[in-house]
Image (cartoon, rainbow, N blue to C red):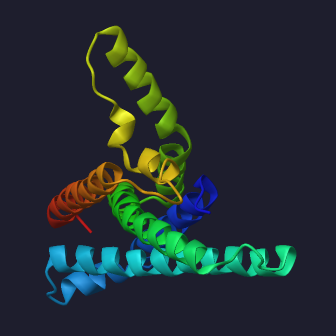
Amino acid sequence: MFSSVSELIIAIFASIYVFADYATGAIKNVVGKGYGRVEVFLSKLVSATVGAVVMQLIMVLSVLICEAVILGGSRLSADVFVAIGGYTAMQLLLSVALTALIVTVGQICRNLGAGIAISACLIMFSSFVTAGINALLQLLDINVNVCDYWILDLISNCPMENMDSSFLIRAIGCAIAWSVLAIGVGGIHFRKADV
């Protein structure tokens, strides 16, 4: 249900949303009014995250509607809705972390083209990079699977049903860690950067 296409849509949305304030000069006005820079960055992040979550929920709803229209909804039972609910909740949590990364990239770039390009490359090619790192680590006899901790690999490998507790704990921990890292880097950069 959640794919790199939906992640790419969110990346484009978040990049445009972050860049718009720089393009119009609104960010100078907001910071000039005395609002704290970290608060301004966090408000931008929260707004982009809410937008991303709403887009993800619309995508889930559209999949369910298409299922009902095309296949008659015969497979939509209570068990399926419970599985979809758990899967959607996990995907939304992981998408929050992804949005934090994308907003931070956009805020650091401050260029619409660069923000979208970097975010798109992050979404399209990072799984190849993590797979390459895993192969290198195996050659070096280091038993660490980087894919188990990278947010986009967690999004694509999230099981639709029968989500075991080890995946659940790892995904929640990684979502929190990547969110905190992105918020920290973005907040520090925005506090010191010239607007």
The quadrant where residue 97 appears: bottom left
Answer above or below: position of 150 versus 68. Answer: above
Answer above or below: position of 59 versus 107. Answer: below
The quadrant where residue 79 appears: bottom right
Q: Identify which residue, 184 or 17, lies in the foreground.
A: 184
Figure disc tally: 0
Q: Residue at x 35, y 57 (%)?
A: 101
The C terminus: image quadrant: bottom left
Q: Is residue 124 left or right of residue 137?
A: right
Q: Is residue 154 left or right of residue 36?
A: right
Question: Is residue 23 at least partly visible in the picture?
Answer: no
Residue, far bottom: 33
Q: Identify which residue, 137 or 98, lies in the foreground.
A: 137
The quadrant where residue 100 appears: bottom left
Residue 146 in the image, given as x and y percentages of width and height = 34, 33
Question: Is residue 62 at least partly visible in the picture?
Answer: yes
Residue 4 in the image, given as x and y percentages of width and height = 59, 53
Q: Is residue 30 left or right of residue 111?
A: left
Residue 15 in the image, given as x and y percentages of width and height = 47, 65
Q: Residue at x 62, y 63 (%)?
A: 1
Q: Is residue 181 left or right of residue 138?
A: left
